[in-house]
């Protein structure tokens, strides 16, 4: 039962006889496969009598993907009587050859601190040493720090772009982010950071969040197990003591076939190398950019470390790379696992998202609700099927479903306070098997509900079931079942008390020198789970163009023409304005340093 042996395992005469006896009862195809596996050193002769070796084992032999340059290694294990191949997983220390090859393309920064009037380390030391009551007419510590943050963020731009393109090549769906996690861990290790922890965001609802497909499967099955996921990465930098602030980036991609065009003069060139290597999966929501910005900020924070291991800032910066944002509630899993409560406990949490509907250079922010609370639903109407020529003998769920679609529109227009906002969208109706002359016996209705507060979402949920029940009864049917998401997303609320600090940081890195006020959106974010636990702030980073109707320059390179960057999130042609990367780094750094200073000064005042 050895895996990847370099030569066939020595076997006794007894083993040979047992193997030959088993072969007598195998089909010719099974014999060929079994002998092949044995000669390749992936199974012993004695294992033939223990396992039925299916043809799938041969298809899952170790292979090298030409597009990704990735060697896949498998363990062979017994699954229901079949010998199946399972890919080896080792997130912390094992790195495949593909990763070594990718890391060769990372453009690590050259230390330019001597070329800058004052280094970031010196600026941070002066900033944290100064008192909140101190003032200076010119060149104060605040301005110097901001200047150094901007300079350093710009200086590592090639580093950022190279990281983002590596991450973009390997999109993975929720709870499958193994390769993504390996990339993050390897870059952290190459920075000299080895105290990171892994295994975060376990998929405890594998029957609902299917790790094999990355899709949400609505089911009432019981017995969910802790199976899949666990690819989150957390690192604490600083003293390891309070106060502690948290910076977050999400990791997962979407089940979308990438169709982002290349400029005409780049077709077939090397720029195509950072298109998705995983067909049917794409970073169409900018999570590759979010990870890149946080890795860039981590690099600069790490550069502040003294030879004795101390940092100029008091407290701890907790950096988290979170899986399963796209419907899998990865932030909730990490919160349940202690990412907020583990010592030192988190005081503030910060996150951000690239935003194509804002102009490049703008940083959107508001106090209060930033993103909506969201839930998904599945309703099943039970009726009486029969021949379409005799509808009076049936109880038609199709007619009842149509009536429900119309009736449920009053849930927002007549059921909610006009000063509140809500959305009810029916996105899928399934009834019958396609026959023209059969009235089906049941219909399934799916959709989503959204609101700008958790209380309003609860009201929508109750109202939805009430209308479905009464509509079904009015048509002589029954509501057989009503299922909602395993983890409905809470509203992402920006803490009112953080507004002065957060809006200042947004203004410091924006092109206009001030934050851009934005309306709340009915999109949802599982960052809301973190905002439920601690005061938090979430930002939109504009990447939609230059304000003159032109798209921002393509991620394919600054001199290769223009590919639109203002297409919506989750669009198959979504394209990142890579100019936003350094702005995100600067925003993370400002939030980290300025919030830690505020927390320390507040703590001193309380003492």
Image: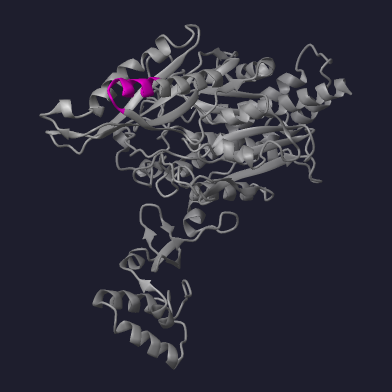
Image point 43% across, 42% down: which residue? 220
| Magenta part of the chain | 467-477
587 shown above or below 504: below
**Could you say which is closer to the camera, residue 153 or residue 276?**
276
**Could you say which is closer to the camera, residue 312 or residue 143?**
312
* Residue 418 image position (x, y, % from top left): 47, 6
Image point 41% across, 41% down: which residue? 219
Left/right placement of residue 238 relative to residue 153 reads: right
Residue 562 in the magenta stretch? The answer is no
* Residue 259 image position (x, y, % from top left): 31, 36
Image point 77% across, 41% down: which residue? 240
- In this figure, which colouring scheme has been used for the structure? one colour
392 shown above or below 23: above
Magenta-highlighted stretch: main secondary structure? Answer: helix
Give the residue at the far bottom of this rendering: 13
Give the residue at the far left of this rendering: 389
Locate the C terminus by quadrant: top right
Image point 44% across, 41% down: which residue? 168
Q: Is residue 372 visible?
A: no
**Quarter assignment of residue 267:** top left
Q: Is residue 62 visible?
A: yes
Give the residue at the far top of this rendering: 418
**Quarter assignment of residue 271:** top left
**Quarter assignment of residue 239:** top right
332 shown above or below 181: above
* Residue 11 image position (x, y, % from top left): 46, 87
233 shown above or below 43: above
* Residue 546 image position (x, y, % from top left): 44, 17
Left/right placement of residue 500 relative to residue 46 reads: right
């Amino acid at each position: 039962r050895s895996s990847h042996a370099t030569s066939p395992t020595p076997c006794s005469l007894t083993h040979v006889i047992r193997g030959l006896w088993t072969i007598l009862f195998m089909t010719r195809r099974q014999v060929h496969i079994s002998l092949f596996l044995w000669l390749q050193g992936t199974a012993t002769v004695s294992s033939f009598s223990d396992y039925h070796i299916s043809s799938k084992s041969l298809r899952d032999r170790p292979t090298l993907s030409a597009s990704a340059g990735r060697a896949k290694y498998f363990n062979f294990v017994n699954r229901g009587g079949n010998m199946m191949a399972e890919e080896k997983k080792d997130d912390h220390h094992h790195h495949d050859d593909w990763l070594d090859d990718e890391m060769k393309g990372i453009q690590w920064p050259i230390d330019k601190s001597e070329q800058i009037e004052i280094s970031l380390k010196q600026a941070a030391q002066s900033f944290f040493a100064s008192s909140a009551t101190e003032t200076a007419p010119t060149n104060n510590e605040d301005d110097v720090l901001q200047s150094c943050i901007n300079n350093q963020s710009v200086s590592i731009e090639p580093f950022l772009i190279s990281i983002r393109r590596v991450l973009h090549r390997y999109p993975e769906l929720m709870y499958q982010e193994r390769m993504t996690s390996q990339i993050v861990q390897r870059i952290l290790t190459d920075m000299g950071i080895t105290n990171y922890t892994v295994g975060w965001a376990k998929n405890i609802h594998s029957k609902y969040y299917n790790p094999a497909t990355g899709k949400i499967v609505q089911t009432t099955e019981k017995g969910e197990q802790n199976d899949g996921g666990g690819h989150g990465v957390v690192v604490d930098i600083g003293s390891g003591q309070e106060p502690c602030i948290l910076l977050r980036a999400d990791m997962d991609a979407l089940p979308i076939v990438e169709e982002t065009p290349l400029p005409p003069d780049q077709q077939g060139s090397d720029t195509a190398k950072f298109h998705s290597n995983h067909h049917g999966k794409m970073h169409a929501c900018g999570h590759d950019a979010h990870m890149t910005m946080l890795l860039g900020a981590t690099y600069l924070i790490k550069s502040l470390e003294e030879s004795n291991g101390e940092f100029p800032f008091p407290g701890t910066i907790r950096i988290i790379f979170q899986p399963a944002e796209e419907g899998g509630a990865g932030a909730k899993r990490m919160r349940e696992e202690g990412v907020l409560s583990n010592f030192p406990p988190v005081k503030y949490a910060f996150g951000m998202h690239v935003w194509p509907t804002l102009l490049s250079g703008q940083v959107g922010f508001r106090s209060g609700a930033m993103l909506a609370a969201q839930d998904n639903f599945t309703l099943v109407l039970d009726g009486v099927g029969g021949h379409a020529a005799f509808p009076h003998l049936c109880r038609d769920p199709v007619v009842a479903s149509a009536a429900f679609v119309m009736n449920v529109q009053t849930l927002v227009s007549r059921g909610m306070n006009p000063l509140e906002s809500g959305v009810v969208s029916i996105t899928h109706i399934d009834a019958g098997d396609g026959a023209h002359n059969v009235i089906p016996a049941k219909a399934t209705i799916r959709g989503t509900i959204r609101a700008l507060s958790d209380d309003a979402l609860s009201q929508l949920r109750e109202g939805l079931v009430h209308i479905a029940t009464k509509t079904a009864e009015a048509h002589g049917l029954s509501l057989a079942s009503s299922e909602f998401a395993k983890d409905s997303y809470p509203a992402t609320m920006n803490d009112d008390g953080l507004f002065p600090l957060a809006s200042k940081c947004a203004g410091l890195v924006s092109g206009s020198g001030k934050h851009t006020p934005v309306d709340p959106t009915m999109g949802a974010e599982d960052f809301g789970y973190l905002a439920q636990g601690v005061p938090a702030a979430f930002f939109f980073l504009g990447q939609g163009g230059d304000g003159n109707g032109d798209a921002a320059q393509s991620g394919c390179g600054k001199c290769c023409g223009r590919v639109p960057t203002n297409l919506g999130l989750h669009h198959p042609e979504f394209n990142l304005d890579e100019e936003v990367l350094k702005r995100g780094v600067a925003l993370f750094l400002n939030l980290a340093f300025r919030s830690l200073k505020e927390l320390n000064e507040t703590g001193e005042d309380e003492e």
